[in-house]
Amino acid sequence: MYDVIIIGAGAAGITAAIYAARANLNFEIISKDVGGLTLWSPDIENYTGFHNLTGVQLVEKFEEHMKDYDINVKPESVEKVEKKDDNFLVKTDQGEYETKSVVIAAGSSPRKLGVKGADEFEGKGLAYCATCDGPLFAGKDVAVIGGGDSALAAALTLIQMANKIYIINMTGELTGKDNSLRDKVLESGKVEVINNAKTTEVFGEQFVTGMKYEQDGEDKQLDVQGIFVEIGHIRNTEMVKDLVELNEKNEIVVDKTGKTSVEGVYAAGDITDLPGKQSIIAAGDGSRALLNAFAFISKQ
């Protein structure tokens, strides 16, 4: 019987785990990967105390901090969380864990492109992480599909490697709110923005050789060797959809303490309905959720 199970090892989950260790709780942190979307960030300039580093470097700092408390992430995939009497049962692809409380910090996953050829060429020139796969496209022409901050961040990463970057934006103008990021991208001289463009197909032979899009009622083609998809994220709430209240965006509804609609279940980070999907906000959410989970356990 655990005091708390933490699901997810991004900024929120790792922070919750450090607070759990400091409180001397009997806990596990379960996640298939470490770092979450923080790992994908090319540059982080607004995380207090670390004003200029990459997402990879920030996650390395997280891991160093976990080592101070001998915290090891259990590399399992959580499939379902359900109530069991007064406690909870966390079911993974490898086993089951009973716990008095749960902190859900499972974050989100990239939204799939969903056009002809997208699934076929995933991993063969089509990718969902510029930080991870960008170096494979050094000196090549690539497209970034999307127009928000994540698309701009991907383009900024690719500027260091690719020959030419096309941003394929569905709306009339870029929707990213980070003006500093937008300026860096547009001033690079390597980026061309194609607005009002709806992607219709990805094509190639063994690997991607191009894509098709529709613009102002006209079908057009772009020859590129790489395509990076940045069209938003889907919250990883499948495991708790039958347990807690979700909103219309599939985000977990929480109060100001991080508590969900179920006593003993807390949520933190991008998976919640709270505004501001950033690493520093997720970390704060993780600490708050764990502190309130600790208060809940102490009352039992």
Image (cartoon, helix red, strand yellow):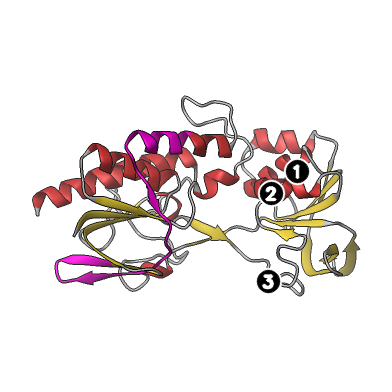
202 drawn magenta: no
SS label for mark 2: helix
* Percent position of residue 32, x then y: 47, 58
Q: Quadrant of the C terminus?
A: bottom left
Which mark is first along the chain, 1 or 3?
3
- Residue nearer the viewer, 50 or 76: 76
Residue 97 placement, left or right of 30: left
What distance separates the C-alpha of mark 2 from that of mark 1?
7 Å
Is the residue under label 2 in contact with that under label 3 (CB below 8 Å)? no
Camera sees residue 170: no
What kind of residue is marked 3?
Answer: Gly
Residue drawn at the location 37% of the way across and 39% of the way down: 284
Residue drawn at the location 89% of the way across and 65% of the way down: 220
Which mark is first along the chain, 1 or 2?
2
Residue 188 placement, left or right of 75: right
What kind of residue is marked 2?
Answer: Ala
Which mark is first along the chain, 2 or 3?
3
Q: Kindly identify which residue carries mark 3.
A: 114
Closer to viewer: mark 3 or mark 2: 2
Residue drawn at the location 57% of the way across and 39% of the way down: 56
What kind of residue is marked 1?
Answer: Leu
What distance separates the C-alpha of mark 3 from that of mark 1?
23 Å
Specify the quadrant of the image occupied by residue 128: bottom right
